[in-house]
Image (tube, rainbow, N blue to C red):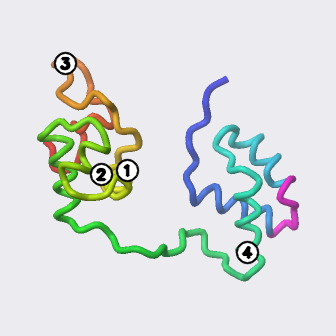
Amino acid sequence: MTEKPFPGKTEIRAVILYHFRLDHTVRETHEQMVAAYGDWTPVERTISNWFKRFLAGNFSLEDEARPGRPPNPDVIEAVRSAVVDSKMSSVRQVSEATGVSIGTAFSILKESLGLRKFFWEVGPSPPDSKPKAGTGENLPGNA
């Protein structure tokens, strides 16, 4: 059996809304989504939270704004430089080098720079290999 590709948050939420509008229960929704999406199905608690949101009249499928300020572009560039130029290999090292908290460094690596995993091996790949996600070779501004 082939692994199903990740459907995306908006698609998952649209399916939850579809089941909500059909008056399905959270459990029925979860069971049918497991059949369609396998491991990508959210847990029943997440589906329940979306049902509550829909019951309250909020049918937006987008994330709600969260408190906190977005990272400064200079800080994002400092974190990117720490990873790419200095070959830092842990969130703690990036945090210490840039003067931001570990949480902020992690958030910038994940959300602003698009690294899903921060590999311990940060550096150039052998000449005949493809860049791995998270090695810094595919970061914005690193041509």
Q: Name the residue under label 2.
A: 113
Question: Helix or strand or loop: what does disc 3 sit on?
Answer: loop
The residue under label 1 is which amino acid type? Lys
- Apparent side of residue 123 relative to residue 53 in the rendered image (left or right): left
Whole-Å distance between the Cαs marked 1 and 2? 6 Å
> How many marks on residues?
4
Residue 37 in percent (x, y) is at: 68, 42
Tell me which numbered mark, 4 or 2, is placed earlier along the sequence: 4
Whole-Å distance between the Cαs marked 1 and 4? 29 Å
Q: Name the residue under label 1.
A: 110
- 92 above or below 52? above
Question: Helix or strand or loop: what does disc 1 sit on?
Answer: helix
Comparing 93 with 10, the one in front is 93
Q: Name the residue under label 4.
A: 54
Question: Which of labels 1 and 4 is toward the front?
Answer: 1
Image quadrant assignment for residue 120: top left
Whole-Å distance between the Cαs marked 1 and 3? 25 Å
Tell me which numbered mark, 1 or 3, is placed earlier along the sequence: 1
Image quadrant assignment for residue 21: bottom right
Decide: marks 1, 4 in contact (CB < 8 A)?
Answer: no
Decide: marks 3, 4 in contact (CB < 8 A)?
Answer: no
Q: Examine the structure image and report whether residue 121 is included in the region drawn in magenta.
A: no
